[in-house]
Image: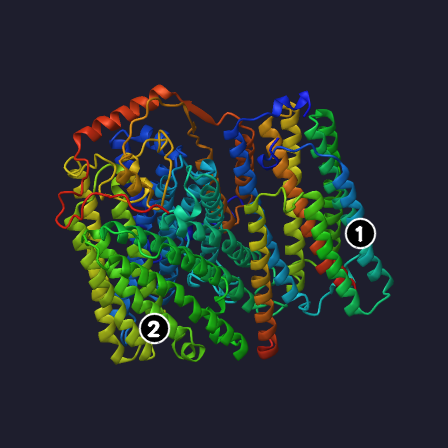
Amino acid sequence: MTASNAAMTISPQDAQKYEEKEFGFWLYLMSDAIIFALLFATYLVMVGNAAGGSTGKELFSLERAAGETALLLLSSTTFGLAAVALSSADRAKVLLWLAITFALGAGFIFLEIGEFRGMIDQGAGPDRSGFLSAFFTLVGTHGLHVSVGLSWIAVMIGQVLFKGLTVPVASRLMRLGLFWHFLDIIWVVIFSVVYLPGLL
Amino acid sequence: MNVTSGIPVERTAKPYLIGIVLAVTLTAIPFALVALGTFTRETTLLVIVAAAVIQILVHLRFFLHIDFATTPRENLIALAFACVLIFLMVGGSLWIMFDLYHRMMV
Amino acid sequence: MDFFGRLTIDSLPFYSAIAASGAAITVLGALSVMAVITYSGAWRLVLFDWVSSIDHKKIGIMYIMVALVMLMRGFIDAAMMRSQQAIAYNNEGYLPPGHFDQVFSSHGTIMIFFMAMPFLSGLINLIMPQQIGSRDVAFPFMNAISLWLTTAGAGLVLISLVIGKFSTAGWTGYPPYSGSEFTPGVGVDYWLWAVLISGIGSTMTGINFLVTIIKCRAPGMTMFRLPLFTWTVFVTAILMIFAFPALTVACGTLVLDRTLGMHFFTNGMGGNMMNYINLFWLWGHPEVYILILPAFGVFSEVVAVFSQKRLFGYISLVLATMAIGFLSFTVWLHHFFTMGSSAKVNSFFGTMTTIIAVPTGVKVFDWLFTMFRGRIIFKPPMLFTLGFLVTFTIGGLSGVLLALPPVDYLMHNTTFLIAHFHNVIIPGVLFGYIAGYMFWFPKAFGFKLNEKWGTWSFWCWIIGFYLAFMPLYVLGFLGMPRRMEHYEIAAWQPHLIVAALGAFIIFLGIVCMAVQLIVSIRDRKQLLDLTGDPWNGRSLEWATSSPAAPYNFAVLPQVQGVDAWWDMKARGVAYQRPDKYEDITLPKNTFIAAVIGGAGFVFGFAMIWYVWWLAILCLAVIFVSIVIRASDDDSDYVMPASEVKAIEDERFAQLAKAPRNEMADDPGYAGEPVAEASS
């Protein structure tokens, strides 16, 4: 325990309060896991319903999926490094790693929007078939969550800048971390259920 | 400092570095198999699923720091319950929908 | 871009007299509420003490107010259906089919989502934190958001009476009928957004209640010392967290189909309509247990207090509740046995459905054994409990019958099914909530409800119920399908006339409840609850004053056994005055939650009418509100010990004026609490 952590000593009541917030957020993630699980189930039920339109084999790109995976995985690591900087109360490092995480996440979204655009331009949008509706909704819901995460990272960069590494700010960062890592887990399932089998 | 208070323990970069190495490996293998087409479809699917399951455990352990020692019991129970329910809901749904497909062409 | 989306002057309900009167009543209702508040100069109070409050007790009361208002609207729907069916033999009746379809759709939607859900959320909010010795729920601000999102959903259903039409697709909204090909227009969209927006509120409520029970219990309150009502809340919360996601996916994907032209459930283009039904009932079955479990919890509390005896079989009740909770995720296909699944699938779910009846049976026996050798006091909450025990059992039996797929093939979608689920919902869910309302009313407001009118209300409800629904069992056997706007079989009409009479008697029961409330408010000085414990209760909510102070407990209780309050009374440590008081931290009032709810309402309206710019604006308002709140590190205030002392001193002064045991004068009173073996 270093002197710089003194700013983060907390009373037992406050510790209790932050425990509650973390547990509550964890429960929200569990409910989100159910939403994604059911979107996956829907996708699996509808993966063969291309209605004469394009299938995954024709539309997906292994390279792009690999690129998206690399960006997201790296961003999980860089967020972890932000958490390490937080625990040593290094404000500059926290901001740096948060910014890098943001950039990587934004890169992921940029690639994904490009992917969706390309498919829509080919006439393979979500309104073309049941398979595509399921694909766009599953992957798009994940992308929406990542976008919300990005705006949360931006807000936290602002909070760290203006409030510093206070206890409430630290607690929010940890919950953001739970969210961000959770989204990476969902992505692992996405490439394992959607992209890789689709390209086989 | 309390590990369960949402305020971080003295964290080192080590778990994250181990995590990313393992995750990259577990990603590269299935991607490579699909790119190269080395094995049959069934085998490849099996490897994809196995790698995914292991990688999820890697993420839980090295990025989310979930373990039996430090993670609060209620978080572990919630996770276990979610897994059971996902199995029931997804498994049940797939059973029902594929049964309907075979019987009713729906 | 169309500034008003697809809103036009034709959206106003001037196409039919009935629709216009429905709109007029809604508008007049809203205006008269505002007029009353203005006339009594109460806007300050309403806005700064209630709308901006994030106190769980106030939120609970507001939830119950929403529920009671929506009960009236849902009942009017029921009355319209009963009267139409009573007269529409070989004629069209007074309600054209399109309108009849809206009425049965809104009846179910309102009763489930906007009467029962708010009612249970309200009772739980009011009481559960006090039962566990806590000062509030874990997340008071999120609690308020849940309330206002639920209200937003109710608002959408109400405004559908004035602008546009409501859904004609039933409360379940099955595609392809509910898709845009077969039902374009705003009705189904009203239904979808009302359900989705309030569903978010319910998921948050589940998280709130679960964290509260796990993390906020008073010292000594172990899980196996929790009152049974709190145990049922615990399992209900788990169901809310894990079941509502399925509804979100079902309704969310239907929105995508309707609004963005996707093909999840279209007939063709790769749609799979059965997937909706599967997803909907994945939610729908746990939902009915979400509704009934808190009611079971109320009955557990009431039966013990009014039998003046410890609840029988605590552990078995807890285990039964947990079993029901878990099993509720394994039976959902029984809602669509007839839709083509193989015998293997049907028999699995049929078996699980028969099994889930067992733990409920255990509970019924536990309640009966509680009453056995008790000294029963027949106050209205107990009357509703007794009515429940007899009547719900019949409904459960008809459920076990329907659990057998071959039987269900005959009875599905007949009025037998309607009779079954009303036979479990009304005596089960509704009697439970009414009993809870009458039982805990003094805790909320400081005075009791008039018992004479409560008793009359009970008799009207139970006689009305039997008259309204038993004929429907017979009609089901006679082959009458559900949702029939008119019919040509003479043999059905007498039963439907009896059912309409039953509905009228239920109406009298509702009138009795309204009169009860008015009379009680008028006579409140004679009905005062001065001790906070008007029924000689057993659990900790009776340890607080009536109404409870903002902080509930000035000093957190030290729990030493089950029936914690009874135990304290028996050991002589009830009503103890501490030497000194501490400062207490409480959340500040804030309007942000109501703003988010209001923006949710407008967002839903905008999405329904395709007013895209408004929808985006509302999302921005919600986002900004959340960021503001999430950046606010100063959302609590400290009530100084001196203020706590002043409130407590007043409470003890009031106690001095009151008979220590308000039940001691009651005939049949069984005596003072004595020390029992603690567990």
Q: Which mark is residue A173?
A: none
Asked if one can make out residue C277 in the rendered structure from this viewpoint, the answer is yes
Front residue of C203/C675: it is C675
Q: Which mark is residue A66?
A: 1
Do circles 2 and 1 both sit on a common chain?
no
Q: What type is the residue that disc 1 sits on?
A: Ala
Front residue of C117/C171: it is C117
**Chain letter of the residue carrying label 2:** C
* Residue A159 picture location, percent across and down: 62, 27
Mark 1, other Cα within 10 Å: few <14 / some 14–19 / many ≥20: some
* Residue C249 picture location, percent across and down: 55, 56
Please state, as top left, top right, bottom left or bottom right, where the N terminus of chain A lies in the image.
top right
**Chain letter of the residue carrying label 1:** A
Please state, as top left, top right, bottom left or bottom right, where the C terminus of chain A lies in the image.
bottom right
For residue C42, above or below residue C676: above
Q: Which residue is mark 2?
A: C416
Question: What secondary structure is found at the residue carrying circle 2?
Answer: helix
Front residue of C107/C542: it is C542
Q: Is residue A53 left or right of residue C610?
A: right
